[in-house]
Image (cartoon, rainbow, N blue to C red):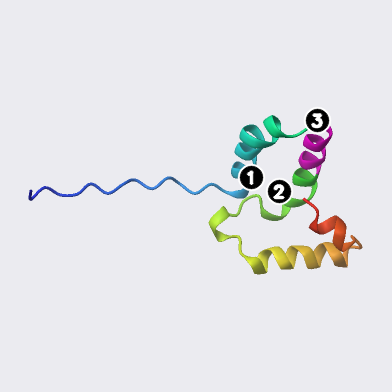
Amino acid sequence: MGEPLEEKKKEAIPNFKAFVAQWMDSYVLTNNKPSEIKTKKTILNHHLIPAFGNLSIDKINTLDVENYKSQKTNKGLKHKTINNP
């Protein structure tokens, strides 16, 4: 009809920390028992958020994750501990 098409506005891609906060509220708190919630919060706050917190989730790639796992292994953590969510 000769009218310009409006571009659909893209939502801003959150960083890891913001994504995790939303995931905790929308999924973890409603689907996990209290002990599992506590475990997930501990892992996130002590390990994952310090490592990935400010990165945009679309920028975290396989190499980033493998480097993280390598660093944790070098600090003495066992593979099962690192790989268990």
Give the image quarter of residue 63: bottom right
Q: Position of residue 25 (x, y in %)?
A: 64, 32
Mark closest to the chain's N terminus, 2 or 3: 3
- The residues bearing labels 2 and 3 have C-alpha atoms spaced at a distance of 20 Å
**Residue that numbered label 3 is attached to:** 34
**Residue that numbered label 1 is attached to:** 17
Between tags 2 and 3, which lies in front? Answer: 3
Tell me which secondary structure the magenta stretch mostly adopts.
helix
Q: Residue at x 62, y 49 (%)?
A: 16
The amino acid sitting under disc 2 is Ile
- The residues bearing labels 1 and 2 have C-alpha atoms spaced at a distance of 6 Å
Q: Residue at x 7, y 50 (%)?
A: 2
Over which residues does the magenta segment extend?
34-42
Q: 10 Å neighbourhood of mark 1: few (<14), some, or many (≥20)?
A: many
Instruction: State the SS at label 1.
Output: helix
Tell me, yes or no, whether the highlighted magenta stretch contains residue 39. yes
Between tags 3 and 1, which lies in front? Answer: 3
**Residue that numbered label 2 is attached to:** 49
